[in-house]
Image (cartoon, rainbow, N blue to C red):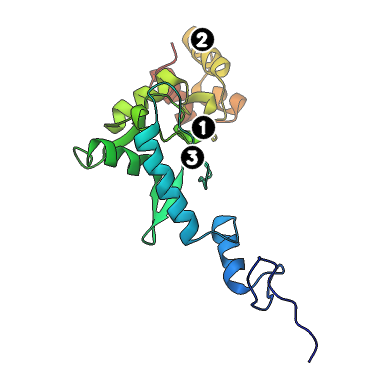
Amino acid sequence: MANQAICLIPNCDKPSRTRTMCNAHYQRWRRHGDASAGKRMVDDGLAQIKRALTDATPAACWMWPYQRSGDGYARITIKRARCLVHRVVCERRHGPPPAVGYEAAHSCGRGGEGCINPFHLDWKSRRANELDKLSHGTHNRGERHGMSKLTKDDVVAIRAEYARGGISQAALGKRYSVSQLTISDITTGKRWGWLT
């Protein structure tokens, strides 16, 4: 029998299966982006949370150095459950949420960059958290929304043209590649109502 390649991870003598790693290390790499992840990564993450709770100062953000989701929020797996780290930190600092639906809100506006500073976290209702996003400039309404077809300038022009008269909502919809219902919602303030 020919010599079989072994896993490239140091101190692992298991046979190489995929991407020059044994099956266990390959699965860790697939799940965590780090072949040596797993218990050590969780332990390091919990230690990082503990350090944030004891060493963080009110001024600077405390950024999560490990795995983040696609939206930038810090994540960790604890007892096979995926958790948002800022919620774990907020719960350890302030206790459980006061009611169902409360969110761990960032006063710094940098949650999407991985901030877990306990001084920057507090429980807030969904509405209060959304208002915070407006004040931080991290909201995704209007043209910042990924599905938006219109810009602020388009909406202002649509309202002005419709107010002048002489053009139907259907014609405006065709011109801007949106439905007549969207034009109706824009002119009545149901959509883009915040834009004056």
> In the displayed structure, does residue 136 sit left or right of residue 66?
left
Q: Residue at coordinates 51% horizontally, 45% vertically from top-left?
A: 68
Precedes in sequence: disc 3 or disc 2: 3
The one nearer the camera, 30 or 47, is 47
SS at badge 3:
loop
> In the displayed structure, does residue 86 sit left or right of residue 97?
right
**Residue 153 point in image, percent of width and height:** 57, 15
**Residue 55 point in image, percent of width and height:** 39, 33
Q: Residue at coordinates 78% horizontally, 84% vertically from top-left?
A: 3
Check disc 3 and give the amino acid type: Trp
Residue bearing mark 3: 64
> Looking at the picture, does residue 171 appear above or below residue 196?
below
The one nearer the camera, 81 or 188, is 81
> Looking at the picture, does residue 80 appear above or below residue 104?
below
Q: Residue furthest bottom?
A: 1
Q: Quadrant of the N terminus?
A: bottom right
Query: Residue 56 lies in what quarter of the image?
Result: top left
Crowdedness of circle 2 by 10 Å Cα count: few (<14), some, many (20+)? few
SS at badge 2:
helix
Q: Quadrant of the C terminus?
A: top left
**Residue 131 point in image, percent of width and height:** 35, 23
Check disc 2 and give the amino acid type: Ala
The one nearer the camera, 145 or 126, is 126
Residue bearing mark 2: 160
Residue bearing mark 1: 179
Precedes in sequence: disc 2 or disc 1: 2
Q: Residue furthest right?
A: 2
Question: Do the residues under discs 3 and 2 have CB atoms within 8 angstroms?
Answer: no
